Image: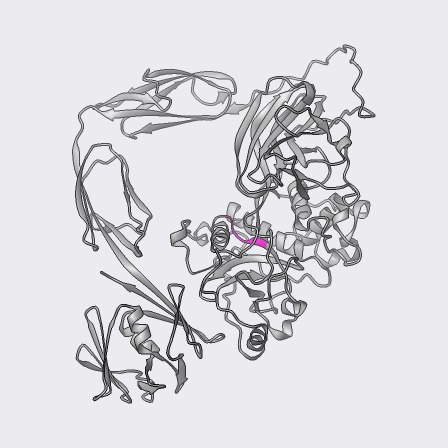
Amino acid sequence: MKLKGLRKLSSAVLIALMLLVTPVSLPATNPQVLANTVETATVPQLPLKFEQLPTRFNWADYGIVPEGRDQSPYGTCWAFGLTGAFESAIALQYHEKVDLSEAWLVRATGKLAPATITSTSPCALREEGNTKWAAAEALIRVGQASEDCLPYLSATADMCCIGSSCTLPSCPVKYRADSFKVVAVSDQTEEEIIKVKQALLEHGPMEVGYYVSREDYIDTSRNATVIATASVNFINHEVLLTGWDDNLGVWIVRNNYGTSWGRNGYGYIKYGKAGIEKNFAYVTATVFDPNDIVLAGDNGTAFGSESFGSNTAWMGMQWTVTTPIYLKSVEFWTATFNSQYTVYVAPGKITEAGEPIFSASGTATEIGYYSIPVGMIPLTPGYWNVQIKITSPDRQRVLPQTGNPEFFFNLKLQPDTVFIRRSENAPWEDTLSVGNSKPIRIRLNTAGTYPVFEPSPTPLPLPTPQPKPIPKPEPQPTPTVSLAIFVTPSQGGTVKTVPSEPFRQGQQVQLTAIPNAGYHFVSWEDGSTNPIRILTLNSSATVTAKFKADADKEYEIVYSDNLGNSWTKTVTEGDTINIPLQRTDGWTLKSVTINGQLSGVKDSLTLSNIRSDFNIVVKYVLKHNISLQVGSKEMLHNLSPIQLDAPPIIVSDRTLVPLRAIAEAFNAQVNWNPDTKQVTVTIGDKTILLTIGNPKASVNGQPVYIDPQNPQVVPIISNSRTMVPLRFIAETMGATVEWDPVFKNIYISYEEEP
């Protein structure tokens, strides 16, 4: 569904506006918040439901976003955008303000994937290198050092290195990325825009690529802050997406040309107007562990996708362990949204795999990089394999694909290492013979002994090995696991464990549910009614003991709202009741009061473990949102266009609007007396009387000045239509008014009560 209500401006008008008027003010990051530590209090309590999305939101308002940087003189916008997203993720996850080195990321990308860096445009990424995906791979593999260790311009010419010419200094690395996700493929529909907003709220600022003319994103003398170019099929610039403003219909972005560009480094991109494609991307951070080893099936990153005529295919990887080691996670790229995956870890070669010792299934809702923890599985010497089954909703895009080694020339396809299976019953194929590879890797934890690939010199079958004495492995500490115990209701009883913590992996633990006075044991979460339970802790687990009161009490739930609905429900002590509060008839939830206390706005109200009476009072309002533009006859009422008989005008430095259209949009009654040249507006308990040419009005019989600061402001007749001062009539009716001096837009909001 195409977006409705987005105002269209020609490029000529847009350029004129950017040249002739002061840009819309964008809030700068609060310098007092930009300390080394991001306080928890600075992170907003965010609404995560569609109905609660604010009309304007910007992470820069919360001190999460680093100050704008300057990428000149290199084509490294991709490194600055991704670094900004990574720094913001660390601030949100670990409440730590960091300044990371873009030069480090450029060098690491050039070293890991040299074919992605072009020498003709220094530090720019080639299209065949799939832009920032290679840089994300570098963040995942080696993390990112601080700016102090490798300043951006101090790197000079060797910063934009390729392959073996790239060196990374001995810098401490505290964080690495553990995921890279693409949220949406464009912003052309309302659904996609909502999805991007939700991701911004949940994950923080994102890197975004778009198409824009060079003067619009680099020319600081023009102070250009609004980008509204027509959509195209390619991208030439990448920035950091920090928020949105629905009043203007724009994304808020931080550019990479310092704080002198735009408004303190920030600008706007119109929804659906900058050729954004497959570039709404975020990262998540984790602490860098020097004991981790990334054992990759190839040396590339996700480049494209591959299909075999079916929605399901398999990719696999095998390797040799020489010394006992722990498997920490299985990691891989996905090619489509909502891919179903199942991960298996098994002993032996992939073509002769034994029974899996681990499996996990899930849905990869976004395109990108996933890390599936496996719980520190101990691996004995010998062959091991990982198998990943992928089911995609798109037949044409099932398995991720690194690409042709001709373009990704650092790609190392090793025999007997990476495999594909085209269907459930098809044989495994060595990708060396197929001429392609799948970006699969595993992450292991070690104390210093590395597993190695031991492929055959050729893709021919290995000869039958002769028995060799296997060295006795050094004793390894048994990993510990956790056991989380919950009791419902909380006062119902306790659970005794024998032995007590800490628990070792594989240990048997006896659980005994002991009810408190006035309660009895009901069951465990698995339905077992035996209060004594034996649990083998092969991995961390969670158990719940359910108790119930011996004598049930009853309580009353009384509900009423301002729409005329009311009911009373009797419940039993300990019950849970859910009350839906959202409506589909246009009425919006305003407030919820429980036993005289305001509880805040929610989608639904859940009362758990009820032990008292409840009196619930709910208030609804009908929201009206109007936007107009001086000189335009089009008015938007709740995003629906309405044609006016007369456009808004400016007289005596005040905005006048056609009265009848505004008032009737708020369900007010309007009466015109041609003899006295008076107009009466009735809304709720207010009656407003205005007289053409008179600077005074009457509100419920009391005379008031329309504009005490400017007695020249009066109602007038223009083109046979009554024009009244906007702010007076709107605020007298109880509405709020916002004015955009750049585009001369007017935004009016009003909440109508029943």
Where is residue 85? Give x, y as percent: 58, 52
Asked whether, in this view, residue 343 is left or right of residue 119, the answer is left
Asked whether, in this view, residue 18 is left or right of residue 292, the answer is left
Which image quarter holds the C terminus?
Answer: bottom left
Is residue 705 in view? yes
Where is residue 74? Give x, y as percent: 73, 60
- Quadrant location of residue 12? bottom right
Single out the residue that lies furthest toward the front. Answer: 309
Q: Nearer the viewer, residue 607 or 363?
A: 363
Where is residue 209? Give x, y as percent: 62, 56
Residue at left offset 21%, top offset 35%: 611
Single out the residue that lies furthest toward the right. Answer: 457
Q: Look at the image and say whether residue 456 sits in the magenta stretch.
A: no
Where is residue 80? Give x, y as percent: 64, 56
Is residue 450 in view? no
- Quadrant location of residue 535? top left
Q: Nearer the viewer, residue 267 or 334?
A: 334
- Quadrant location of residue 550? top left
Q: Is residue 125 above or below residue 173?
A: below
Residue at left offset 59%, top offset 24%: 377
Q: Which residues are magenta?
A: 203-207
Q: Is residue 286 above or below residue 28?
A: above
Q: Is residue 740 above or below residue 425?
A: below
Q: Nearer the viewer, residue 300 or 1?
A: 1
Q: Nearer the viewer, residue 566 or 433?
A: 433
